[in-house]
Image (tube, coloured by chain):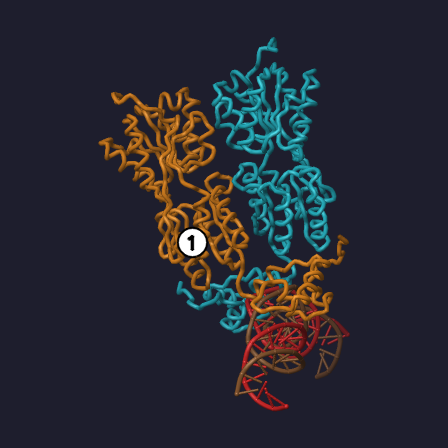
Chain colours: A orange, B cyan, C red, D brown
Amino acid sequence: MSAPVSKSPATLHDVAREAGVSLATASRSLNGSARKVNESYRLRVVEAAQRLGYTTNLFAQAVAKGSTTTVALIVADIADPYFSSIAAGVIDAAGNENLVVTIAVTGRSSERELDTVRALRGQRPKVMILAGSRTTGSPYEEHLRAELSSFEDTGGKVAFISQDAAPFATVLLDNRGGARDLAIALAGLGYRRVAVITGPAEIRTAEERLDGFRTGLAEHGIPLLPEQIIHADFTREGGYRGTQELLASGAPVDLIFAVNDVMAVGVVSALRDAGVVPGQDIGVAGFDDIPTVRDITPALSTVRIPLEDVGRHALRLATGTATDAAAVQQAVSTETIIRGSTPPRDATAG
Amino acid sequence: MSAPVSKSPATLHDVAREAGVSLATASRSLNGSARKVNESYRLRVVEAAQRLGYTTNLFAQAVAKGSTTTVALIVADIADPYFSSIAAGVIDAAGNENLVVTIAVTGRSSERELDTVRALRGQRPKVMILAGSRTTGSPYEEHLRAELSSFEDTGGKVAFISQDAAPFATVLLDNRGGARDLAIALAGLGYRRVAVITGPAEIRTAEERLDGFRTGLAEHGIPLLPEQIIHADFTREGGYRGTQELLASGAPVDLIFAVNDVMAVGVVSALRDAGVVPGQDIGVAGFDDIPTVRDITPALSTVRIPLEDVGRHALRLATGTATDAAAVQQAVSTETIIRGSTPPRDATAG
DNA sequence: GAGGCGTCGGTAAGCGCTTTCTCTGCTAGT
DNA sequence: ACTAGCAGAGAAAGCGCTTACCGACGCCTC
């Protein structure tokens, strides 16, 4: 109860002195060790620690042990529900293994991603989890891999989320398959004149989803022409503006697929602002199943990714606590969710 | 370019040897120091470091310096947009000061909050930011304060977000004033039969908002009777169930105020599921202005809190980089936002 | 009953850094 | 020309912790 009003935290040394034992004994009693300590000693130490309000200095411990309990998570934008859900999963799983999670944000810039990785290496984390989509053709991508390889060479573990990033462990999202299934389901509902609002061409997640969607449509003989594809930012604003662009083009459309939910939310908003009733006039579908989309009107059809699980998987994969310990990849399956934004369409349309 | 394939990261020692200088010189050249180093030496060191892929071991540095560059942020649920927006602000501001943010989650349990604080002390963070609402009457609250006081006694800084938590620095949210203004605005729109769905009674944020709302109504002579107040979880589900309960009671209502947006989203959903048209039949308002609420239908009236700014303020307050350096409190102002969920009501109602 | 062995405290040598202090080699002042 | 003074490199003592290693002690075995 009495606050020890020293000017710096109690050290193990203080505890040892207070308990009248050696430093080694104190260390062994407080911070798990293979060696046994006489119960009466242990008790004395624990009580002394209690009394002094001692908490192990994790940094010093890390230095001495040469290994840390830190997990570094790198996301594009923590306020984006996609990433915050993943983060929740990572943090949850980390808690189970007594790991501390530090989060860094890249703002979707490959350059900052690289800088971030470099900076985070200074923390000597046990694991680094990269949650953002991979990009193609970025000059930084190669440096990033080099940096990460060197990180693994020096004892770290890396896990990616989304695209296969061999030789690194990856939680694979079935972007292609999910989008394909969605396309098939939507075609089955009668949609024929389809437009896609996708992200920047170098974002692989966007490309894969677009590609899968195209494949699914093709199975129903529905073409997807270049002019029906609009590239925009991977954000709500991107979806909004892409939709404006689409509407302005005057192309006849009965369905807009946005490659992620955040964009789809922008689509719905843009449609409504343009006096088009989403769902009724034009169907809208997204991808990810972020929590928001069941609450907007109409509720969005989408492809469900169990985001929190993805985060958990990523951590387990990296720490080797995955069910299949040797696995270096783990695919999570997706599920098509049809909601009000894509009601059945009269098949005679188009 | 050539990856150093040692089994553990290069140390400063390695760099010094490679550059042919002493450890001290290497340290001084790489990690800022008051002392000057001959430019030619500095260059040699920097190049050697480059060649070896050296990055400072931040932990070791922290141990040696006796101070860290870590900020610990404690939130109830990182997947909740309220907290993830705040987190984004904290991370942003931290980046500017070269601080690393680690995030821990309490799941709204006071007990876990206390445990978390204890555990995080092991990281000897420079700053701890507690973002969750304070509670009243929790036996843990007192222990928490003791723990935090002792943390400050040993050189740490603490910042709270929401309620005044003297003697700790606090970013004050004007819950009462914001709710009052909202009530006045809504009364002005003609709402008269009001129900409130609030959180558990011990959550101070919920109580303050309820109280402020009541005050605002009173100014228009509108009463708020106990049976018009429903307590529920501070989550979307809580809002949903609270609304069901309200509807089941058969009380005549033209407006539901949920004390936060997440709950309000649940309210809207519950209304719709019950065949009531939100906005048209019953107005709905929330509090926080999380990004989601402008995208749901109808867009929610709410009280805007600049959440990212709140995060930034909290960090600056704690690090002493706030505009007013000596400040220990910073109030952020709120703004009433009226959207489609509360259209003007015929004043003859009720 | 002596040697072997297993326990378990304590001593001290690190871990990778920073920082004080020492010491050398200058420049500059008289 | 000689010393005071200063700059700046390097040696070494930490920071708070872990963990070989050492040695005292008690127990078992033959």
Return the residue nearer the eye: A80 or A251.
Answer: A80
Q: Which residue is mark 1?
A: A322
What is the number of callouts on the image? Answer: 1
| Spot occupied by residue A223 in the image (x, y as percentages of width and height) | 24, 32
Measured along the vertical axis of the image, is residue B223 above or below residue D17? above
Q: Residue A98's image quarter?
A: bottom right
| Spot occupied by residue B116 in the image (x, y as percentages of width and height) | 61, 49
| Spot occupied by residue B227 in the image (x, y as percentages of width and height) | 65, 21
Measured along the vertical axis of the image, is residue B95 above or below residue A68? above
Is A203 positioned to the left or the right of D5 in the image?
A: left
Is B96 positioned to the left or the right of B52 in the image?
A: right
Any part of residue B35 in sight: no
Any part of residue B15 in sight: yes
Name the residue rendered at 61%, 14% in the picture.
B190
Return the residue nearer the eye: B67 or B207.
Answer: B207
Measured along the vertical axis of the image, is residue B174 above or below residue A19? above
Name the residue rendered at 33%, 27% in the picture.
A255
Given the image, what chain letter belongs to the residue carrying mark 1?
A
Q: Secondary structure at mark 1?
A: loop
Q: Residue A64's image quarter?
A: bottom right
| Spot occupied by residue A342 in the image (x, y as percentages of width and height) | 36, 26
Return the residue nearer the eye: B122 or A20.
Answer: A20
Q: Residue A40's image quarter?
A: bottom right
Q: Quadrant of the N terminus of chain B?
A: bottom left
Return the residue nearer the eye: A168 or B6.
Answer: A168
Q: Amino acid at mark 1?
A: Ala
Q: Residue furthest left?
A: A221
